[in-house]
Amino acid sequence: MFSKILDNVARVMSAWLAVGIALYRLIIIRNALHSKFDSLSTLSAGLKTLLAVFSPLFLLEFFYRIQFKLTPNNWEFEEVCGYPANYTVVYYEFEKDEDFKLKLLDKSTYDFVNALLRVAPTFVLPIVTFGLIREMRKGKAAMRKRMNSGAQESKLDNTTKVIIFMTIASIIAESPYGTTYFLVLWLASNREYVSLLMLILNCKPIFDIFVSLNTMSHCFISLAISTQYKNAVVATFLPITSKFKKPENTIRVTQSRSLGDSVSNNMSQRRLASSVAS
């Protein structure tokens, strides 16, 4: 049960942390002249953010799943399986404990809140990203104005491209994952859509792959667009790769000082002999 709680919490937590990072960037850029907001970029602020996101998600899962207990059931095989008659195997599953006195959270409320928490980042993240890009462009326009530069920005800079591409990738990955939960809640009560419900449930592993690809794509997008990211990668891995390089043999040609002195002496002797002969 504890592993199931952590699995659900970590899945939703990753989406909301992306929203939190974008929100912190927006607040810091918008209040760049106020030093009190510099604390948002410290380690303590990051740990507090992790705790603030983790706590409500963990409590939601904990208060719901504490009402279940592990119960044994008998699994009877069909005759076509080749087992003898009346052959059963005990298996265990979680079922709701009816004797549990404290009714903390019913299934309908849990399913609705859980689905809302999964689909909400796909709507909140674009709004925060739009505000972040807007503040960045305003800051650059003010900087050009202070520098008395009349040049207009004709294309998006690399930082804006990184933010836009990452936001699009996150929306593509997260929106199907959260939308399926609402569809499952709506279709579960209608027997007419059982086949469609099974199709959606079978597609959930594919949506998990989208989320993994989205996480991996952030590295490659930043590496392709951001110069600072490239420099950080080179500074990190270049000392490691240089240890495996073969030493190069170089030949340096330098003029000997004694040879130069002898050549100059010969030249002076020839000049002296020619002057005496004349």
Image (cartoon, helix red, strand yellow):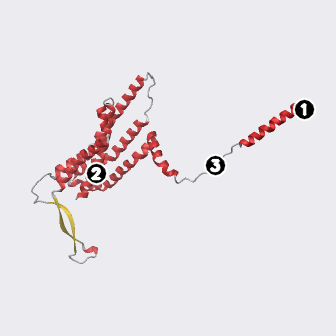
Callout 3 secondary element: loop
Locate residue 92, reporting x and y percent: 21, 66
Locate residue 8, reporting x and y percent: 26, 53
Q: Is residue 127 visible?
A: no
Q: CA distance from mark 3 to mark 2?
A: 55 Å
Q: The disc labelled 1 sits on which kind of residue?
A: Ala
Image check: 80 left or right of 71? right
- The reply to whether discs 3 and 2 touch (Cβ–Cβ < 8 Å) is no
Within 10 Å of the Cα at label 3, are there few (<14), some (14-19), or many (20+) other Cα atoms?
A: few
Locate residue 158, reporting x and y percent: 43, 36
Q: CA distance from mark 1 to mark 3?
A: 48 Å
Q: Nearer the viewer, residue 210 or 200?
A: 210
Name the quadrant of the C terminus: top right
Image check: 278 left or right of 58? right
Which residue is depicted at the point 24% across and 72% down? 78
Q: Which residue is mark 2?
A: 10
Callout 2 secondary element: helix
Q: Is residue 29 visible?
A: yes
Q: Which residue is mark 3?
A: 250
